[in-house]
Image (cartoon, rainbow, N blue to C red):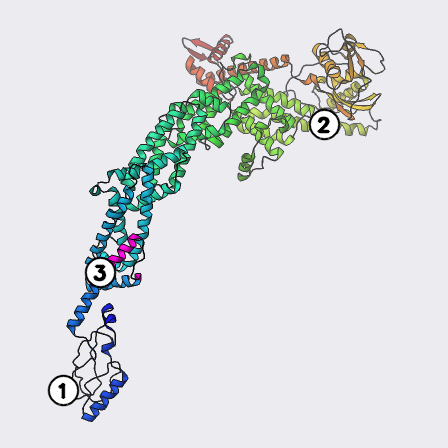
Amino acid sequence: MQSAADQRSSPSRRRQRPVSSSSSSPPKRAKLVPATTTAAAAADHHNHTAGMASAKSRGKMPDVVDLTKPPSAFQPHAGAKKLVIKNMIPQRVRDNRTETYYQHMEEDLDKGLEAIFAGRRPSQPLERLYRGVEDVCRRGNAESVYRLLMRRVEKHLQSVVLPRIAEGAGASDVDILRSIQVEWKRWNSQTTLTRSTFSYLDRTYLLREHLPSINDMAISQFRKMLFSARYGNHKMESDVIGGICRLVDYDRRGDAAMDSELLRDSIMMLYVQGVYTKYFEPVMIKTSKEYFAEFGSSWSAGGLKEYIAACEKLLTREADRCMAYNLDSTTERLLMELAHRILIHDYSEKLLNEGSLANLMGDKDMKSMKGLYDLLKLSGLQKKLKSPWSDHVRKTGAGIISDKERGDDMVIRLLELRRSLDLMIRDAFGKDEDFLWGMREAFGGFMNDRTVSACWDTGTSKIGEMTAKHIDMLLRGGIKTLPASLQSDIQDRAAAERAGQASTADEDAELDRQLDNSLELFRFIEGKDAFEAFYKKDLARRLLMGRSASQDAERSMLTKLRGECGSNFTHNLEQMFKDQELAKEELEGYKQHRQSLSESKPSVDLHVMVLSAAAWPTYPDVRLNLPDNVATEIERFDKHYKGKHTGRVLTWKHSLAHCSVKAIFPKGSKELLVSAFQAVVLLMFNGVNGPLSYEQLSTGTGLTGGDLERTLQSLACGKTRVLAKHPKGRDVKKTDTFTFNAAFSDPKYRVKINQIQLRETKEENKATNERIAQDRRFETQAAIVRIMKSRKTMGHAELVAEVINLTKKRGSVEPASIKKEIESLIEKDYIEREGNAYTYMA
């Protein structure tokens, strides 16, 4: 049996089941009386036994049946049956108790909400309150519970929370925002307890009726308190949004009043309350626009470098702020678009100022140039950088070419310019192809601009000449002759390895890369005939003097030139290598011939290179009085060669000869590596104790003029002075006398003396350029004749265009020069003029 208190607090929701008995005849339904309590629905075992005994004594079935036992197999007594449940509470009493329970429960719920909102622990356990909500809702009073909850929420916000926030009236918007954030966190905590207590209402009634959940309702009510016009809280709305925007401004300006946690929590509050886009974002964009305009105006007064750095920093911080404080992606996009328009697009004239750009590029400021390119790319203006950038390249290159004082460094400076531009395109412009083509156009423009190269007597041919000399320097001295600024860096080596090429850390691979860079300049040159002439001359010197740093590099360069200009361009160059191989075979045959004669070993070990005059450059014939033993060996080789090859003539070029001479000094013997001119001068001092005059040396050697002066200068005025000049000085005069330098010493046994006579003189340079001009004239005339022979009759303008197109691979020809060659051919009766047209004469 249960107590009255138990009956009130837990009304039964169990249903009675009809009872059936087992019988052979159709069972009859028992009459059931509903019970109000669980205890009253079942009889104990003792009562059941007593009932059965009483039935037996009366000779009939008992009136009370135990429903907890399985049905018995006895034959039921026919007739109506009645089910009696002990201790059943009457219906009227039960209804009164239930109503009282629900009234008390609603009071308990109201007090519980009051306690939760006040931050106290409810007097009733939360489990009891949860069960109470469930009971009331099951009874059909869910709506009244929801209204109770709504009333209590609204009352608390209006009478408690709002006054607490209003206590900060007159304070700054940031202080009010901080107070609101405290209340918001407290409200979230209270809402969590409320939602847990009323979760049954949340899961049933609110879901079924499509009403906002308790959590959504709590957020909505708090939002209305802050932003709804019904509460008249327009100032609070402005304080909330204004406070957040002020915190953003503090962060932008680095103000110490910045509160990162408050800003982050406040933005999250706007998200949760669903007012971020409607109330906050427009104000945020407006204040940001004002800040960006102020920022641009302030920093634009300084230099371009400072402005670029400031804009980069600002954009980075704006993006980081959006990430750190969880600003919406739409807000971030709008902010960035606004910053790009105000700071980049509106100040594009400053960013693209040619003078400022020239300073950055002149200083090779990769960081600033990368920043500038990235900024312009954000607004789609990076292509506009190409024009001022190309202009700077053109002006800088033209200045290098027209600088006569530093003409010897022309190619090195052009390559340094090219290297810096390549690095800028790679590291600053993201390998943008437009800038690569812009650089090539600029180089092709200033390198072939006749007004730029007008300071040189040879015009644009000077660039071809200097490029050939630079390649000669590389092939003679290797990469040691280059400045560090031109050599590969780590990124170049990594790129080479990724491409499957040899790493540029390898010396041969680096030399090959430097040759490729030189070939890049060669591609821009229109006057390739000048390059060919000087390259051929320098190659001959390297081959004859054995000065090549690498035969593989020589042949690799030849292959590159053949691929660039065709086999006609490299025919003579390839013949020079073939002549070398044939000369070795010829010399080997001569030595075998001498050995077959069983003669005594000659006092001179003669090495001769027989070369074809057509493939090699022309050299002047210089008279030289050779020592008798040397002259004898030369005559023997001459006789042998002519006997073997009939109809051939050998012309000896003593200016290209070099030899090894053994010299005995008081401080030790030395082997001197000298030229033929130096050797015959040194041999004049054998057996001579006194000085020899300039005239005596000239008579004895056969050398005159500049050849003798340069030879004496190399022996008496250079770093290795085996002769002494009287009087001392750097220049050699005809009144000077020379003596053997007995005090000469050197730590090395083999001493090489600089061969000054092999350096190119102005006369030789002038002669080479004259040959280039003459060859160009002949090529132009040949092109005219070839065209007229094919076309028979042509107009002047058409003929000039055809000649330029036909000769462009060899070098550019001015229309005036073509006209001059036409006149020359008219005089020679190759063509005749008829009005403004020309006719070919067979």
What's the residue type where badge 1 is placed?
Answer: Gly
What's the residue type where badge 3 is placed?
Answer: Glu
Q: Is residue 619 above or below residue 121?
A: above
Q: Which residues are magenta?
A: 108-126
Alpha carbons under labels 3 and 1: distance apart? 49 Å
Identify the residue under disc 2.
586
Q: Which quarter of the rendering shows the N terminus?
A: bottom left
Residue 261 percent location from the top left of the image: 39, 43
Displayed quadrant of residue 589: top right
Identify the residue under disc 1.
79
Residue 123 forms part of the magenta stretch: yes
Is residue 564 or residue 253 the one in the foreground? 253
Helix, strand or loop for disc 2 = helix
What is the number of the mark on residue 106? 3
Q: Is residue 73 visible?
A: no
Helix, strand or loop for disc 1 = loop
The first of marks 3 and 1 along the sequence is 1
Is residue 307 or residue 689 the one in the foreground? 307
Badge 2 vs badge 3, beta-carbon distance below 8 Å: no
